[in-house]
Image: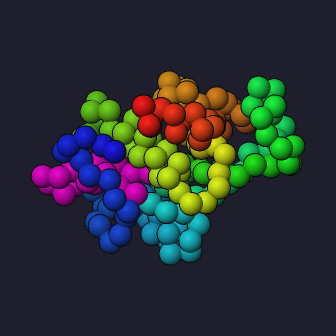
Amino acid sequence: MTAAPFRVKRLEKEDRASFECGKDELDRYFRKQIGQDIRRQVTTGFIALHETTGTIAGFYTLSATHVPFTDLNDDWRRKLPAYSTLPAVLVGRLAVDRRFRRRSLGSALLADAAMRAVQSDIAARFLVVDALDEDAVLFYQHHGFRRVPGNENRLFIPLSLLEKLISG
């Protein structure tokens, strides 16, 4: 989904030591924890590789989650069964290395995550994100995500809306 010179792929055994987005929590997770989470099958990791240098320019994770029915506004509730929770895909973490900022790579990674969620054979109704801070909240709101009531750093968007945006 990203434009040249980046290619998005599943994280395998690439060297993650030099990645630095500037947020200690995300840097530490990517360098030390993501491999364990992948092996334990609690997340799947994707990376954006710079085509020329092979440098990891960004990453994101996907896993399963749910959205409580009570968190939906009336407009979204009207179209859905009143189950206590509805299936969703979680973008648990998303970050861009400092060296690759200001190239819309964060937006491209989010679009790639949305495309994978939409094209998955597993039923899910929403794409959910856990924003690290207010800057991240603003980034996701810019892309159409809404805050979950009572959890100001959790945001979500219907996959059906993303599917319309992706298909043009």
Which residue is outermost to the bottom? 39
Residue 85 visible? The answer is yes
> Which residue occupies the foreground of this view, 124 or 60?
124
Residue 24 shows up from this direction: no
Residue at image coords 84%, 37%:
70
86 vs 22, nearest the viewer:
86
Q: Does 97 sit left or right of 4 as displayed?
A: right
Q: Which residues are magenta?
A: 46-60
Q: Residue at x 45, y 69 (%)?
A: 35
Query: For the point 48% across and 32% down, which residue is it?
Result: 165
Q: Is 52 on the left-hand or right-hand side of 15?
A: left
Which x, y percent locates residue 10? 38, 63
Residue 47 belongs to the span the image colors magenta: yes
Residue 158 position (above or below residue 146): below
Indicate the quadrant containing the C terminus: top left, top right, bottom left or bottom right: top left
* Main SS class of the magenta portion in the image: strand
Looking at the picture, how far across and down is residue 124, in whole percent? 65, 51
In the image, farthest residue toward the left: 52
Say left or right for 84 vs 114.
right
Q: Is residue 112 within the magenta segment?
A: no
User: Measured from the top left, where is residue 36 in percent x and y?
Assistant: 50, 71
